Amino acid sequence: MRKYSSNLAFVDLLFNLLVGFTSLFILSFLMINPISKDGEVTPPVKAFVEIEWDEDSDRDIDLFVKGPTGNTVFYASKENGYIVLERDDLGKANDTYTLNGESITVRRNYEIVNFTDLPPGEYVINVLYFSSQGDPLSVKFNVRTLSPHLIIHSGEVENLSPRNERTLVSFVVGEDGKIIDINDDVQIPIATRRAVGP
């Protein structure tokens, strides 16, 4: 009797290994992430202005921002399309919250306005000591852009007295979107009688 030998089993094994390695190669190639551009972000906010005053004060300081469209954003009108008052701090009045039955006070007096767009024109940023009584306060402020992150202007208004309004800064955004003509010398009142109250 004659014996026949075949290498079919060995060829089958090699073919299966080749299919397996090819599948793994394709899967690993698909899982490669594209190279990210380091440090590049596209934030939804183009710029913002923030004010801060004595953390122990219970006095209400308000931020007023007037954009080139003429509308003013402040505590009674918190949004104007591309300008939004994100936080209206009332001194200690809205700084307390309850967690697990315990009352916790955030020791920070802070307001912030975001700009989601910067159309060309003049912007005026004012601060108003809303409380009708109290000692004069100092208010620190920053105006920043986010892409790229730059401090456009920062400073401090000292001896702000009750019911007094001061212009922190005004600036112009050019047709190219760049902030130009920054001015902190001229006082431009924007708080209306209705906004300020009696």
Image (cartoon, rainbow, N blue to C red):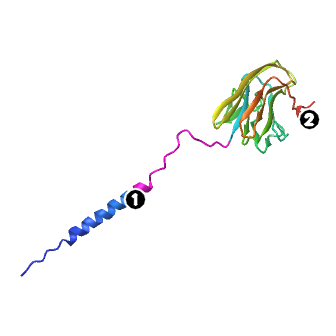
Q: Amino acid at mark 1?
A: Ile
Q: Is 25 rendered above or below residue 42?
A: below
* Residue 14 x/y as whole percent: 25, 65
* Residue 157 x/y as whole percent: 78, 21
Outermost residue on the bottom side: it is 1
Q: Quadrant of residue 63?
A: top right
Q: Amino acid at mark 2?
A: Arg
* Residue 83, label in figure: none
> Which residue is under mark 2?
194
Residue extent of the magenta highlight: 26-44
Q: Quadrant of residue 95?
A: top right
Q: Quadrant of residue 72?
A: top right
Query: Disc 2 on helix, strand or loop?
Result: helix
**Quadrant into which the C terminus falls:** top right
* Residue 96 x/y as whole percent: 72, 32
Q: Main secondary structure of the magenta part?
A: loop
Q: Nearer the viewer, residue 31 or 179?
A: 179
Horizontal side of 32 relative to 174 (left or right) equals left
Query: Disc 1 on helix, strand or loop?
Result: helix
Please tell me which residue is depicted at 72% across the width and 38% down the height of the picture.
114
Residue 164 on the magenta span: no
Q: Nearer the viewer, mark 1 or mark 2?
A: 1
Please tell me which residue is depicted at 18% across the width and 71% down the height of the picture.
7
> Which residue is under mark 1?
26
